Image: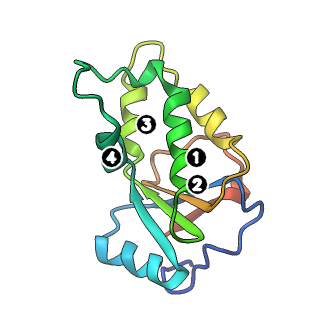
Amino acid sequence: MLTINNLSLQDVKPADYPHLLLWDSPHDAEIHQLAFNNNAQIISYRDNLISRINSKQKYLILQENISQELAAIKEICDHANKPIVILKDLEILITYLYSQPSSPLSLFWHKLGNMRHLESILWILLPTQIHPINWNKKRITTIV
């Protein structure tokens, strides 16, 4: 059974691919403890998205800009201050994509799963119910 005290986020292979950290209802203190234990930086996708919004645009059309969102995730890793990134709040984008007609969610998962050459080890924090079925099981860790 994995807990935040015995989980090493740096011991992953391959280190330049994204990894999923499935965890239902973590408290902020637990996430911060995990980050502290692993010398990781916590970054909120939601806060990053808000910082990138053009105030002149009326609507977010994220389903048409999947490449832009993937590039933003890669950029988060490129500009991280620590060797490991814990990306939280990505379920906002996933839920948004899922709710769209002709959802590009499968394409998003495919491209995210195949993203390579990340500058930091990327752990995407998600609830256990929100993860792709065909994601490489070696790159999924569940905290109970």
Q: Indicate which label's residue lies in the foreground, 2 or 1.
A: 2
- The answer to whether 40 appears left or right of 53 in the picture is right
Question: Spatial distance from mark 4 to mark 3, Cα to Cα?
Answer: 12 Å
- List the residue tagged with mark 2: 78
- Disc with the residue nearer the chain's start (4 vs 2): 4
Amino acid residing under circle 3: Ile
* Position in image of residue 41 (x %, y %): 46, 69
Dot 1 falls on a residue whose secondary structure is helix
Quarter of the image holding residue 111?
Answer: top right
Question: Spatial distance from mark 3 to mark 2, Cα to Cα?
Answer: 22 Å
- Residue in the image at 35% along x and 67% along y: 26
- Disc with the residue nearer the chain's start (4 vs 3): 4
- List the residue tagged with mark 1: 74
Residue 46, label in figure: 4
- Disc with the residue nearer the chain's start (1 vs 4): 4
- Residue in the image at 52% along x and 79% along y: 39
Q: Indicate which label's residue lies in the foreground, 4 or 2.
A: 2
- Residue in the image at 61% along x and 79% along y: 8
Q: Is residue 44 above or below residue 3?
A: above
How crowded pointer 4 is (Cα within 10 Å; few <14, some 14-19, many 20+) is rated as: some
Q: Are marks 2 and 1 in contact (CB under 8 Å)?
A: yes
Amino acid residing under circle 1: Lys
Residue 94, label in figure: 3
* Position in image of residue 95 (x %, y %): 38, 35
- Disc with the residue nearer the chain's start (3 vs 1): 1
Q: Is residue 118 above or below residue 112?
A: below
109 or 48, nearer to the observer: 48
Residue 89, label in figure: none
- The answer to whether 29 appears left or right of 64 in the picture is left
How crowded pointer 3 is (Cα within 10 Å; few <14, some 14-19, many 20+) is rated as: some
Q: Are marks 3 and 1 in contact (CB under 8 Å)?
A: no
Question: Spatial distance from mark 3 to mark 1, Cα to Cα?
Answer: 17 Å
